[in-house]
Amino acid sequence: MDNVLAVLNLGDFAQAFSKMGMFPVFDLAYYIVSILYLKYEPGSVEVSRRSPVASWLCAMLYCFGSYILADIMLGSSPIDYFQHNSHILLASAVWYLIFYCPLNLFYKCVAFLPVKLVLVALKEVVRTRKIAAGVHHAHHAYHHGFFIMVIVGYVKGSGVALISNFEQLLRGVWRPETNEILNMSFPTKASLYGAILFTLQEAHWLPVSKSTLILIVTLFMATSKVVMTARHSHGSPFALIESWVCHILFGSPLGGGEEDHHTATAVAPASPLKTKEELSEGARKRKAKKAE
């Protein structure tokens, strides 16, 4: 792979891209999209009016939940990341503008689809860096703990989703059926697969440099997420491969089992073309119209 990039003169680009700083532009995009999705969640706007402190804590979990969970797993203080004052202040400013900006101007700007697509792409750049950093950190702590590397990288990439049930409690909502382990979204799956790839690279089992792998994973995740957001789809690029593998190894609903067939027909998705965040946003808007 590195030889191919060398022929295309992309090796230097991959190296420069892997060393590019994330603060403040990329981190700002990450905070905006994260808190934007928080506002889509049921009850989040009501909580912001009733208890700004609870709303702020939820926003911080959306922005820094992956760091908190990874620190707990590695034996560090869960509030260790809050020593980075610039990041906390930037995320807090985004939270305030999204929830309290007059006439919802800031929210309307960042929720405008062309702007949102750019922000989503920038967020995936940060996600990939977090996965790579998590694997690298775990590699130093547990040099031969390959499963630990995968788990820490996975948590760094999707920790926000993994602790979503705890965040729901802060908003006074309890929806155990949204457990991310049971219903893995595309970013969660991509974080897991990305963590496996970076672990293989860290163990020198993957013949590719880290900078090249960062570039490849970033391009895949950013492109996939942008396309899914533009199409208002919650499908997954992994669906075809996963269905085939699960059918062969574990027996999936596509295997045609009678119990699986009844389960699949009894529980139908609300809308195959809308993401969870957009469904929540639509429900919130309908509720507001009824109140008027």
Image (cartoon, rainbow, N blue to C red):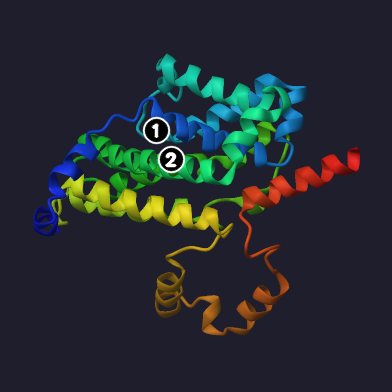
Q: State which quadrant residue 270 falls in.
A: bottom right
Point out the image quarter for the C terminus: top right
- For the question of whether residue 208 can be seen, the reply is yes
Q: Amino acid at mark 1?
A: Phe
Q: Closer to the camera, 93 or 160? A: 93
Using the image, determine if residue 83 lies above or below residue 8. Answer: above
Q: Where 25 falls versus 114 (above or below)?
A: above
What residue is pinned by disc 1? 26
The image position of residue 123, as x and y in percent, is 43, 40
Instruction: Tell me which corner region of the image, top left, top right, bottom left or bottom right, holds residue 35.
Output: top right
Residue under label 2, please give it.
123
Residue plotted at (90% across, 38% down)? 291
Element marked by disc 2: helix
In screen coordinates, is 132 left or right of 246?
Answer: left
Q: Is residue 166 visible?
A: no
SS at mark 1 in the image: helix
Residue 264 sits above or below residue 31 on the image: below
Work out whether residue 99 or residue 119 is closer to the camera in this orientation and state it: 119
Quarter of the image that includes the N terminus: bottom left
Q: Quarter of the image holding residue 152?
A: top left
Disc number for residue 188: none
Could you tell me residue 111's position as x and y percent?
60, 40
| Residue at figure coordinates x 55%, y 77% from the top left | 253
Residue 274 at x, y = what percent? 63, 58
Asked if marks 1 and 2 touch (Cβ < 8 Å), the reply is: yes
